[in-house]
Image (tube, rainbow, N blue to C red):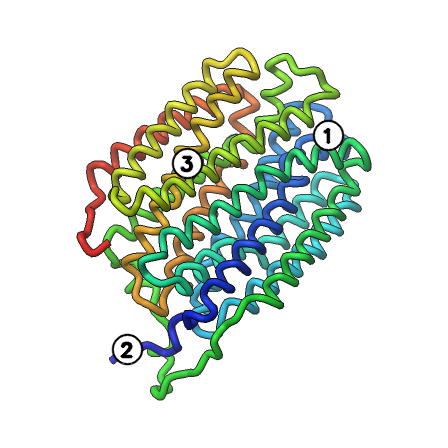
């Protein structure tokens, strides 16, 4: 008989402090990441690649390889976190980012960036771990708000990061901006180290390995779980399709070359801020609206925004479309994570969120690579594919997702 192995959640005295720790660390870490990554196409150009199609291709490969590797390992890290604790895994991930971001500043060839991003994938994945930490620390009736708060931080960071990064890149250059990013990851590490309280993991009496951690199969059989993994893959696919092409599309809309970095940074911040609003709204809406309805509405709203990408002929209309798109993506993602978290048994959130994050990261990995090659033919074709994918996702969820009363 399988039994719960560890004390399942932080006591009431610690859950708010833990919520602060994972929210603050997520905000600082994701801010640091978006100081430089939105401008990777420009950095690739500085490394000697001049053809626009090749820039998009290298950008897609570099952005896609890290989440691809992380997606393969994320379920394993989640299961290890359920067994031994998640704090150490998050600290390990943040420290690795400090080292790798510093090393990226010394790259002289595009393949150097690609290689470093590959290594980064071996240690990444702290975003999913912090979601699991928030979900399991919070009381059950606060889970949607806890998940929404961490996801909001993970979006608000990127809302500020590109603007700050664009300014920093203009002052000190893109290379030195990587050192600033490394410093922010070091700060996030200190926040988790000092403020997050994790109960000591005590193995249960039964020594059999089968009882020491939840199995992947038992989690995958939970109600709607596989469908929610598909939802996260689809939403992440659409969300990340912007990264390899947005700076290039801004240039195509008539923005002068010296202003592309700043304008692209503002637009990346706009879509991130809109997604943060979507995360926050979902936490409130789920008090009276089913996750199924929110996911359908979110995917539909994002599809409408994607239509705006296709037809926009100026930066203003494109920015409005980004705002609509971001709100839909944010609300849909939080609803999907919360719907899954509510059916996961206590003590299994690391394994469950590892699988969910793996699905999300797979979308993150596939999208930049695929859109990087697709952009060689047409940037607008990337946006048209988003419209089709999001509309199809809304139809599938409306048709197949159940709404359990206990959730």
- In the displayed structure, would residue 314 be above or below residue 85? above
- In the displayed structure, would residue 96 be above or below residue 391? below
> Which structural element holds mark 1?
helix
Percent position (x, y) of residue 288?
25, 44
Which of 299/106 is in front? 299
**Labels 1 and 3: the sequence-earlier one:** 1
Percent position (x, y) of residue 220?
30, 58
Q: Residues within 10 Å of mark 2 (few under 14, many from 20)?
A: few
**Labels 1 and 2: the sequence-earlier one:** 2
Q: In the rendered view, does 323 fall on the left or right side of 186?
A: left
- Real-space Cα distance between discs 1 and 2? 55 Å
- In the displayed structure, would residue 319 be above or below residue 244? above
Q: Which residue is mark 2?
A: 2
Look at discs 1 and 2 and give the one toward the viewer.
2
> Which structural element holds mark 3?
helix
Q: Residue at x 72, y 53 (%)?
A: 183
Disc on res. 329: 3
Q: In the rendered view, does 307 fall on the left or right side of 53?
A: left
């Amino acid at each position: 008989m399988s039994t719960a192995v560890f004390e399942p959640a932080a006591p009431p005295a610690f859950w708010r402090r833990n919520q602060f720790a994972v929210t603050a660390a997520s905000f600082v870490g994701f801010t640091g990441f978006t100081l430089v990554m939105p401008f990777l196409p420009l950095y690739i150009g500085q490394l000697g690649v001049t053809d626009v199609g090749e820039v998009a291709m290298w950008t897609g490969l570099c952005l896609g390889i890290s989440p691809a590797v992380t997606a393969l390992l994320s379920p394993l890290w989640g299961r290890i976190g359920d067994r031994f604790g998640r704090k150490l895994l998050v600290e390990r991930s943040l420290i690795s980012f400090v080292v790798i971001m510093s090393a990226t500043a010394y790259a002289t060839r595009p393949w150097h960036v690609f290689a470093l991003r590959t290594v980064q994938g071996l240690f990444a994945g702290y975003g999913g771990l912090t979601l699991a930490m928030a979900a399991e620390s919070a009381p059950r009736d606060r889970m949607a708000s806890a998940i929404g708060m961490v996801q909001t931080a993970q979006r608000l960071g990127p809302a500020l990061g590109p603007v700050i990064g664009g300014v920093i890149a203009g002052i000190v250059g893109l290379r030195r901006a990587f050192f600033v990013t490394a410093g922010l990851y070091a700060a996030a590490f200190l926040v988790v180290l000092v403020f997050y309280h994790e109960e000591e993991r005590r193995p249960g009496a039964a020594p059999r390995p089968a009882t020491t951690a939840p199995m992947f199969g038992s989690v995958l059989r939970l109600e709607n779980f596989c469908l929610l993994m598909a939802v996260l893959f689809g939403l992440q696919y659409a969300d990340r399709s912007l990264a390899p092409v947005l700076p290039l599309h801004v240039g195509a809309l008539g923005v002068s070359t010296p202003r592309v970095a700043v304008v692209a940074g503002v637009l990346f911040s706009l879509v991130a801020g809109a997604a943060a609003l979507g995360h926050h709204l979902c936490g409130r809406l789920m008090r009276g609206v089913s996750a199924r309805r929110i996911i359908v509405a979110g995917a539909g709203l994002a599809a409408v925004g994607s239509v705006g990408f296709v037809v926009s002929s100026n930066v203003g209309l494109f920015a409005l479309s980004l705002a609509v798109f971001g709100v839909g993506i944010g609300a849909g993602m939080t609803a999907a994570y919360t719907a899954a978290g509510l059916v996961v048994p206590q003590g299994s959130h690391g394994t469950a969120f590892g699988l969910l994050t793996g699905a999300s990261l797979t979308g993150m990995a596939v999208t930049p690579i695929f859109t990087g090659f697709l952009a060689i033919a047409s940037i607008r074709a990337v946006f048209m594919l988003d419209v089709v994918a999001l509309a199809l996702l809304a139809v599938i969820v409306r048709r197949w997702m159940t709404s359990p009363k206990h959730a």
